[in-house]
Amino acid sequence: MSEFHAAVGLAELDDWPRKCAAMRAVADEYRRQLDTVALSDRLIAAPEVSASYVLFRARDADEAGRLQQSLLDSQIGYRLWYGAGLREQPHFSAVPGGPMPVTETLAPLIIGIPTAPDLGRNQIAQVVQALVAGCRPA
């Protein structure tokens, strides 16, 4: 790490308690809003995991596809949190190993949704609306 990067990192630490609290507040707001539509049990967020990300768990691959399409249609960025799984990464594709059924099951179901210290209630509501739409059967 360069001296410049170290200085920036140290400066950021001064504000870390405020940023961490803001990120937890975003997770709490997601939880509140998802609770009103009976989807909060699908949220994976602080304090159970790091405050720096918020995840949503699809029930199955079909729903995961609908959720992704709904987020795209709403122009909301997302990512499959684990990609397609470790074996699908080019670097590891040729590495020998046994079956990974849990990875293969979970990887397409865990969706990273937007989070930021300044993400507001209305923006969270837009994400929740897209998630609700994606959870409806086709």
Image (spheres, helix red, strand yellow):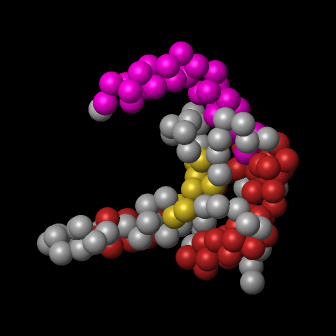
Farthest residue to the bottom: give it: 138
Which is the main secondary structure of the residues drawn in magenta?
helix
Q: Name the residue: 24% across, 67% down.
A: 91
Displayed quadrant of residue 128:
bottom right
Displayed quadrant of residue 104:
bottom left
Q: Is residue 92 above or below residue 41?
A: below
Q: Can residue 35 be seen at all in this image of the molecule?
A: no
Farthest residue to the top: give it: 14
Judge left or right: residue 114 versus residue 110: right
In magenta segment, residue 21? yes
Q: Is residue 108 above or below residue 9?
A: below
Q: Name the residue: 49% across, 70% down.
A: 108
Displayed quadrant of residue 28:
top right
Where, quadrant-wise, is the C terminus in this rendering?
Answer: bottom right
Q: Is residue 58 above or below residue 11?
A: below
Where, quadrant-wise, is the N terminus in this rendering?
Answer: top left
In magenta segment, residue 34? no
Q: Position of residue 35 (x, y in %)?
A: 78, 48
Say how many tags the image has. 0
Q: Name the residue: 77% across, 68% down.
A: 74
Judge left or right: residue 134 versus residue 36: left
> In this view of the protein, which residue sits in the foreground, 15 or 58?
15
Q: Position of residue 49 (x, y in %)?
A: 51, 39
Farthest residue to the front: give it: 4
> In this view of the protein, which residue sits in the foreground, 71 or 65?
71
Q: Can residue 77 be seen at all in this image of the molecule?
A: yes
Q: Which region shows up in magenta? A: 2-30
Q: Name the residue: 64% across, 71% down.
A: 68
Q: Position of residue 47 (x, y in %)?
A: 57, 33
